[in-house]
Amino acid sequence: MNMQASPTLPFYHPTGRECELFETAYKNGLPLLLKGPTGCGKTRFVEHMAARLGKPIYTVACHDDLSAADLIGRYLLKGGETVWVDGPLTRAVREGGICYLDEVVEARKDVTVVLHPLTDTRRTLMIDRTGEELVAPREFMLVASYNPGYQNVLKRLKPSTRQRFLSISFDFPDAETEIAVVARESRLEPARVAPLVRLAQSIRNLSGMDLEEGVSTRLLTYAATLIAGSMAIEQALEAAIIEPLSDEPDVQRALRDLVATIYG
Ligand SMILES: Nc1ncnc2c1ncn2[C@@H]1O[C@H](COP(=O)(O)OP(=O)(O)O)[C@@H](O)[C@H]1O
Ligand SMILES: [Mg+2]
């Protein structure tokens, strides 16, 4: 196991051999794509690995307005002068750090154009505005994540982009691991976390319901944190699980029924 108690190392509980894969990818200069539902530990994993490798991490939360210039940099006016300011991707390339593009499919299409020469053997970042072509040092790594669950057709990662990355699928951990993770994050005793994890598993197994996604490990951690702070279980589950998961009264009722079977 690669759980380390160092205060500077973000806690991450591996669920498979992802740490080894990340390290090997890093050593060989290969980009990595993390796939999986929201709140299952992707971001934490990258933060953990960056700290373990002792590399700076530049995280960019991608959104539909994010353009190539946001990643690369732009000319800005400073005290009457125009100066070039590197974006996070350029900084990561110059410094030899890890650039993490969270939810990369959300970004605008021109971002793909930038990523291609950086993710093949060229390992080059083209900065059109300045005419610079930066060859990434060995220490640079590109990591991206996306959630295959709620992709709309307009926002798919094209095969020509996907096939430039090594990929790992993340999913919610098995019960034992999830209990350990939630207990550690919330400081609620494992025996009291166990029914929460059972609840999560039965929610995730619900089919035919109007739920976009199952409950995340993140939400379980919220619920456990409220309970550890001595909030009544029912209220904690309302605020941390039922309300965040759905706005539909029918769905909420079904979720409350599940709560009753587990806690009743
Ligand atoms: N394997 C894990 N090890 C440690 N914490 C985890 C793990 N999986 C989930 N978590 C917890 O879930 C929370 C959400 O994880 P995060 O990495 O932000 O999810 P994602 O980036 O996949 O949406 C984290 O803050 C952490 O508390
Ligand atoms: Mg994330």
Image (tube, helix red, strand yellow):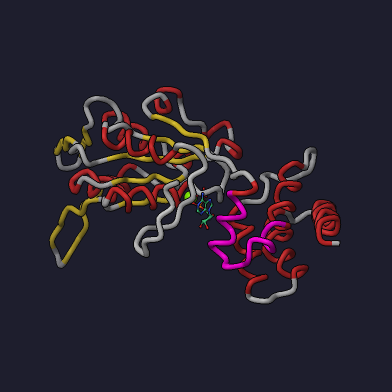
Residue at left 67%, top 51%? 215
The answer to whether any part of residue 65 appears in the image is no
* Front one among 97 and 49: 49
Residue 35 horizontal/vertical position (percent):
50, 37
* Front one among 87 and 137: 137
User: What predominant SS class does the magenta segment belong to?
Assistant: helix
Q: Is residue 45 left or right of residue 200?
A: left
Residue found farthest to the bottom: 230
Residue 138 horizontal/vertical position (percent):
20, 37
Q: Is residue 195 magenta?
A: no
Q: Is residue 36 above or below residue 183?
A: above
Residue at left 57%, top 43%? 37
**Number of dots carrying numbers:** 0
Residue at left 64%, top 72%? 228
* Front one among 76 and 99: 99
Q: Is residue 191 magenta?
A: yes
Q: Is residue 172 left or right of residue 142?
A: right
The answer to whether any part of residue 23 appears in the image is yes
Residue 229 horizontal/vertical position (percent):
63, 75
Residue 150 horizontal/vertical position (percent):
60, 39
Q: Is residue 50 left or right of residue 232?
A: left
Image quarter of residue 207: top right
Q: Is residue 252 above or below residue 38?
A: below
Residue at left 30%, top 37%? 26
Instruction: Please provide the residue range marked out in magenta.
Output: 177-194
Q: Quadrant of the C terminus?
A: bottom right
